[in-house]
């Protein structure tokens, strides 16, 4: 069970996609002696993957199937 609604997850995914796009254009810039450094691309990508998994859980996606035992030879 997820603490998010599907609409909230969709909104966050869109925001992180915009952040990914902005970061891919420029990591940091300086204006009037002040510097802004954006978040790391790998962190944004990993959070997008996490949001995707949360949405799959909310939609009932079963995930990988785990089997027990030994394979036949």
Image: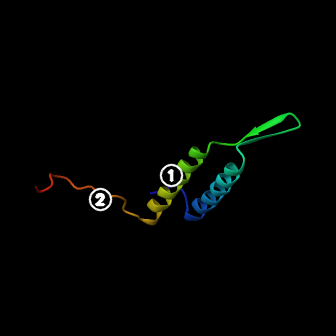
Q: Which residue is mark 1?
A: 50
Q: Residue at x 60, y 60 (%)?
A: 8
Of residues 53 and 28, the one nearer the viewer is 28
What residue sits right under mark 2 in the picture? 65
Q: Earlier in the sequence, mark 2 or mark 1?
A: 1
- Residue 49's place in the image compared with 29, above or below, is below
Label 2 secondary element: loop
Which quarter of the picture shows residue 4?
Answer: bottom right
Q: How busy is the neighbourhood of tag 1: few (under 14 within 10 Å), some, or many (20 plus)?
A: few
Q: Are marks 2 and 1 in contact (CB under 8 Å)?
A: no
What residue sits 67% from the left and 52% below the top?
19
Residue lying furthest front: 25
Residue drawn where x is 16% and y is 52% of the image: 69
Point out the image quarter for the N terminus: bottom left
The foreground one among 73 and 54 is: 73
Provide residue 13's location: percent of width, then percent of height: 60, 58
**Inter-mark Cα distance, 2 to 1:** 19 Å
């Amino acid at each position: 069970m997820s603490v998010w609604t599907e609409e909230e997850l969709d909104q966050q995914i869109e925001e992180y996609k915009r952040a990914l796009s902005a970061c891919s254009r420029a990591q940091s810039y300086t204006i009037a002696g002040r510097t802004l450094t954006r978040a790391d691309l790998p962190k944004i990508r990993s959070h997008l993957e996490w949001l995707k998994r949360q949405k799959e859980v909310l939609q009932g996606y079963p995930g990988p199937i785990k089997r027990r035992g030994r394979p036949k030879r």
